Image (spheres, grey):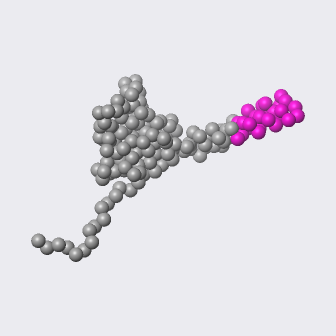
């Protein structure tokens, strides 16, 4: 038997997937405008230092709330699906189904399973349903919002096949 002297070909590792489920651009000016209007309303009824207190509290509070709403990250990396603080090893993924807005509404609608793990952002239309194959876990599936459902499902299945 003849052995090749060339080095072994590197194994293909699936490309990692990463996405931040941030707010749409228009939510920032709209949220800040509402906070500014509310602060101005409160400013009209107060005098002295109390007149500026609504601006000092509401504007930074609104910025913090808008940042907090868009902080969730979805990643497929190091053999895991990571959604914020939740981690799912890809070896437990049976299937990944990309969903459009109508499919997400059907999965999360009237017949939804109450044991499902759901990270849903209403300003994002697409999602991925990740069906689990773990007899020790009562969670039947995950539903995760994403702007790129096909890419996330493909990355999950590629990472599962590589594991």
The residue lying furthest to the bottom in this view is 5
Measuring from the top left, give residue 148's x and y in whole percent: 43, 47
The image quarter containing residue 56 is top right
- Decide whether residue 24 is among the magenta residues: no
- Which residue is found at the position 72% from the left and 36% from the top? 58
The image quarter containing residue 100 is top left
Q: Please, is residue 138 above or below residue 97 in the view?
A: above
Residue 18 located left or right of residue 92: right
The image quarter containing residue 146 is top left
- Decide whether residue 38 is among the magenta residues: yes
- Which residue is found at the position 67% from the left and 38% from the top? 62
In this rendering, does residue 152 appear at all? no
Measuring from the top left, give residue 105's x and y in whole percent: 42, 32
The mark total stands at: 0
- Which residue is found at the position 47% from the left and 36% from the top? 120
Residue 43 located left or right of residue 86: right
Q: Is the magenta stretch mostly helix, strand or loop?
A: helix
Measuring from the top left, give residue 39's x and y in whole percent: 76, 34
């Amino acid at each position: 038997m003849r052995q090749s002297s060339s080095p072994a070909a590197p194994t293909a590792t699936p490309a990692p997937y990463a996405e931040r489920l941030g707010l749409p651009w228009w939510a920032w000016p709209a949220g800040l405008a509402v906070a500014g209007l509310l602060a101005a309303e409160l400013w009209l009824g107060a005098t002295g230092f109390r007149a500026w207190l609504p601006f000092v509290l509401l504007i930074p509070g609104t910025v913090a709330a808008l940042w907090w709403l868009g902080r969730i990250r979805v990643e497929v990396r190091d053999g895991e699906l990571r959604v914020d603080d939740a981690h799912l090893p890809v070896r437990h993924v049976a299937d990944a189904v990309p969903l459009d807005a109508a499919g997400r509404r059907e999965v999360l609608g009237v017949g939804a399973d109450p044991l499902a793990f759901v990270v849903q952002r209403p300003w994002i239309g697409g999602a991925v349903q990740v069906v689990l194959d773990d007899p020790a876990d009562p969670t039947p599936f995950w539903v995760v919002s994403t702007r790129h459902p096909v890419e996330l499902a493909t990355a999950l299945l590629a990472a599962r096949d590589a594991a």
